[in-house]
C-alpha cells in the first residue's frame, strides 16, 4: 500500500539519528510509527516493546525471511526523542530495515529498505514541512507524480 501515487520523494537520508531528530517537525501528531527489522539491537527492541501499541493500519511486510520483528509505536515527542537518542549509538540496520508512519486513515511515510532507498511522503504533508525537514537533515526532495 503506497502512501499515494503523488507526494514527495526524499533521497540521501543516511543517518538515523538525524532522521529521527527531525521527525517530530514533519509528522502531524498523533501518528503511529512502524518499525520492521531482522537485526534490531536489544536496547532499541526493549524501547519499542515497552512503547508498543496495537496496529491500527495493516502494512505489507518488507521482509519475508527471516521473519522480522515488527513494532507499532505511538509517535510522541518523547518517543521520537528517545529513538533519536538511541539511534546515535547504533548502526541504521540495528534500528529498522523498513519504516512507516501512519495515522488512523492512511500512510504518511513509506520507507522500504530504510536508509538505502528514497523515503516516500504522502502529499497530505505540506511541501513547506517537507522542505524544512529536508533542510534540517541536509537532503533533497522531489515531487512524485502518477506514472
Image (spheres, grey):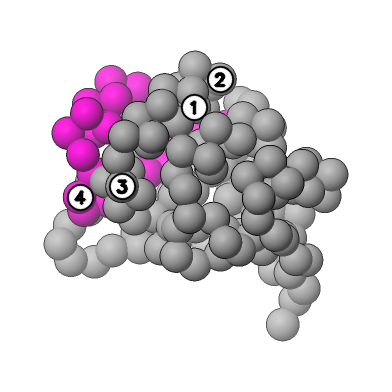
Which of marks 3 and 2 precedes in the sequence? 2
Give the CA separation, mark 1 to mark 4: 20 Å
Q: Magenta span has 50?
A: yes
Secondary structure, mark 3, is: loop
| Mark 4, other Cα within 10 Å: few <14 / some 14–19 / many ≥20 | some
| Mark 2, other Cα within 10 Å: few <14 / some 14–19 / many ≥20 | some
Residue in front for this viewpoint, 7 or 96: 96
Residue that label 3 marks: 91
Q: Give the answer, above or below, for where 89 lies relative to 147.
A: above
Work out which residue is located at the far top of the displayed protein and give it: 78
Q: Does any portion of residue 56 appear in the rendered image?
A: no
Query: Which numbered circle lies on residue 77?
Result: 2
Give the CA separation, mark 1 to mark 3: 17 Å
Are discs 4 and 3 less than 8 Å apart at CB?
no
The image shows residue 19 at horizontal and vertical percentages of 53, 42
Query: Which numbered circle lies on residue 80?
Result: 1
Secondary structure, mark 4, is: loop
| Mark 1, other Cα within 10 Å: few <14 / some 14–19 / many ≥20 | some
Query: Which numbered circle lies on residue 39?
Result: 4
| Mark in the foreground, 4 or 3 | 3
Amino acid at each position: 500500500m503506497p502512501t499515494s501515487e503523488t507526494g514527495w520523494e526524499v533521497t540521501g537520508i543516511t543517518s538515523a539519528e538525524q532522521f529521527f531528530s527531525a521527525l517530530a517537525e514533519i509528522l502531524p501528531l498523533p501518528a503511529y510509527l512502524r518499525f520492521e527489522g531482522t537485526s534490531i539491537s536489544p536496547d532499541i527492541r526493549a524501547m519499542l516493546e515497552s512503547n508498543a501499541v496495537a496496529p491500527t493500519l495493516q502494512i505489507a511486510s518488507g521482509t519475508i525471511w527471516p521473519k522480522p520483528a515488527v513494532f507499532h509505536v505511538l509517535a510522541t515527542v518523547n518517543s521520537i526523542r528517545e529513538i533519536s537518542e538511541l539511534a546515535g549509538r547504533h548502526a541504521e540496520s540495528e534500528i529498522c530495515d523498513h519504516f512507516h508512519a501512519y495515522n488512523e486513515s492512511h500512510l504518511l511515510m513509506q520507507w522500504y529498505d530504510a536508509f538505502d532507498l528514497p523515503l516516500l511522503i504522502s502529499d497530505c504533508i505540506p511541501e513547506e514541512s517537507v522542505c524544512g525537514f529536508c533542510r534540517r537533515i541536509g537532503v533533497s526532495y522531489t515531487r512524485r507524480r502518477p506514472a
